[in-house]
Amino acid sequence: AENNDMFGVVAGLRRFFSGTTKDDETVVVRQLARLEKRKRDVDDLPDYARLKRQVLSPLAPEAILRIREAQDEGMEAWIARVLDDDAVSVSTTACDAALRRLRRFVPSDVQRTSLARLKATLPQDLATRVWRHKSLWLVRFHPKDIARLHIADLWSRYDNQGLSLVELRAIWACLAPIHFVSDPDRKKLDWKLSFKVKLDEVEAAYAASRARDTHQSRKKKNDPRASSDDDDDDDSGVG
């Protein structure tokens, strides 16, 4: 059961022709990195050698040589870099817009401010939120400063709980480009990617809520006598 997703990957790769493009090679590299990571995450990965041959099968010998040369930096470092780049490849348009929005009310000197000073310039509820959710402060941190933060602080002081969609987008815009040079156990990278997982969850909830609202709106538009029962549906999705 653990390898069902990998077999799906292999099936998808079979669509490639013998002459692969650069984009095809990029896809294979990412799938190979996921396979290598899975091998390290579990005690035993059955059929690893066969799966690896199948993943690499669409590539020409020179492309495989390029991958092996890249892996000379160390397998763990190579996996982290490839999978990190995979996460960064997500479109950042909405995230960049959210970042600009948050920076309008998170002061540049937030690390040296106080709750009283925030309340003097922001609505009280907003000031309290900025003060309590220290993760919002990341939008004012330099990437190198974020990379230097202690892992204990990352997981406790700068966690991703209780954040809105816009807030998660803004923080991801800051985190996406960061590469942790000194992260041998990948705990910092895991912290970073936990924001992407949370963002995906909230994005999905928001999309489901919008789809439900659109469906109900069209239903009422087409049938003015539609039952008011629709209004009783749970509408707790992210707005």
Image: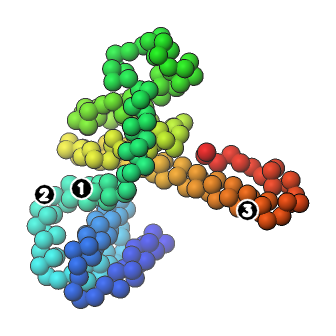
Of the pair 234 and 35, the residue shown nearer to us? 234
Q: Which mark is residue 218?
A: 3
Q: Looking at the image, tell me whether mark 3 or mark 1 is earlier in sequence order.
A: 1
Q: Residues within 10 Å of mark 1 (few under 14, many from 20)?
A: some
Residue type marked 3:
Arg
Image point (11%, 62%), residue name? 72
> Depth-wise, is mark 3 or mark 1 nearer the camera?
3
Q: CA distance from mark 3 to mark 1?
A: 46 Å
**Residue 53 higher or lower than 35, as above or below:** below
Q: Position of residue 194 (x, y in %)?
A: 42, 47
Q: Which residue is mark 1?
A: 81
Q: Position of residue 73 (x, y in %)?
A: 13, 57
Q: Which residue is mark 2?
A: 73
Please name whichever residue, 208 or 72, is drawn nearer the observer in this view of the structure.
208
Residue placed most toward the observer, 58 or 19: 19
Which of the pair 125/73 is nearer the observer?
A: 125
The amino acid type found where label 2 is placed reads Glu
Q: Are marks 2 and 1 in contact (CB under 8 Å)?
A: yes
Q: Secondary structure at mark 2?
A: helix
- What percent of the width, then of the height, locates residue 75? 20, 60
Q: Secondary structure at mark 3?
A: helix
Looking at the image, is mark 3 or mark 2 nearer the viewer?
Answer: 3
